[in-house]
Amino acid sequence: MKGYLKYALVIILMIALADINAQIKSRYSGGVHLSTMAMNIDGLSSDPTMPLGIHFGRIFEIPIIGGFNLQTGIFFSAKGTDYEVDSVRISLSPIYFEIPVNAVYTFGSDKVKISLFAGPYFACGVGGTLLEAGQPLKDLKFGTGESRDLKFFDIGLNFGLGICIKKFLVTAQYQLGLSNASPNTNDGSEIKNNVIGISVTTPFIGKK
């Protein structure tokens, strides 16, 4: 946990200083996604579905050289999945505070530009709900142990492409969770986030 916090604090500090550097540009971004969780619970693989979710936040872009940029930001992302265990249908809907760190390469003409990006993301749970068939809706509990629903931290990889037309950027991305989000791993249980998303990003704000 301390390792994750250290990386997150460095990135948050970089973002906090962004607006005082004239070379750093920012945009607002939001969109929809289909999310699911690859699951192996108590040694049994489930067949989760992909409910619709949303994400929104602010992106900061730091020029490096030529068409290469470093891109980070702050996002709220509603993920989750619906699955079945022992004939009981369960809907898991976590909300994450998320920080991506992507390397971006952009090329094209003045009218149309194409971007390719990839990099890690760091996320922490900030809320969400758990609904089991026949039971009342519950708030998600983050942490470790049998009394918890998901681990607090999640890390993974982003990769995708974007098309910029008239200064608006439309991106399609895939997010692959790498860490095991299961709060109890003693029995070999495993939960990993997987997300397919589409985002629309505004033109740059302020200095360019």
Image (cartoon, rainbow, N blue to C red):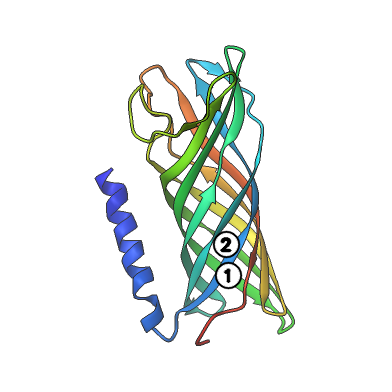
Q: Quadrant of the N terminus?
A: top left
Q: Is residue 141 left or right of residue 26?
A: left
Disc 2 secondary structure class: strand
The answer to which of 196 and 92 lies nearer the viewer is 92
- Indicate the position of residue 148 as horizontal and vertical percent values: 38, 28
Q: Is residue 113 left or right of residue 93?
A: right
Q: 10 Å neighbourhood of mark 1: few (<14), some, or many (≥20)?
A: some
Please report whichever mark, 1 or 2, sits nearer to the chain's N-terminal start. 1
Residue where numbered disc 2 is placed: 117
Residue 105, which numbered label?
1
Q: Looking at the image, is 200 positioned above or below residue 66?
A: above
- Indicate the position of residue 55 as horizontal and vertical percent values: 57, 54
- Indicate the position of residue 118 as horizontal and vertical percent values: 54, 58
User: What's the amino acid at mark 2?
Assistant: Phe
Q: Looking at the image, is 109 positioned above or below residue 40?
A: below
Circles 1 and 2: CB atoms closer than 8 Å: yes
Q: 10 Å neighbourhood of mark 2: few (<14), some, or many (≥20)?
A: many
Q: Residue at x 49, y 58 (%)?
A: 75
Disc 1 secondary structure class: strand
Q: Residue furthest top?
A: 86
Q: Residue at x 49, y 30 (%)?
A: 191
Q: Residue furthest left?
A: 2
User: What's the amino acid at mark 1?
Assistant: Tyr
Residue 69, which numbered label?
none
- Indicate the position of residue 208 as horizontal and vertical percent values: 53, 87
The answer to which of 116 and 88 lies nearer the viewer is 88
Q: Residue at x 27, y 48 (%)?
A: 3
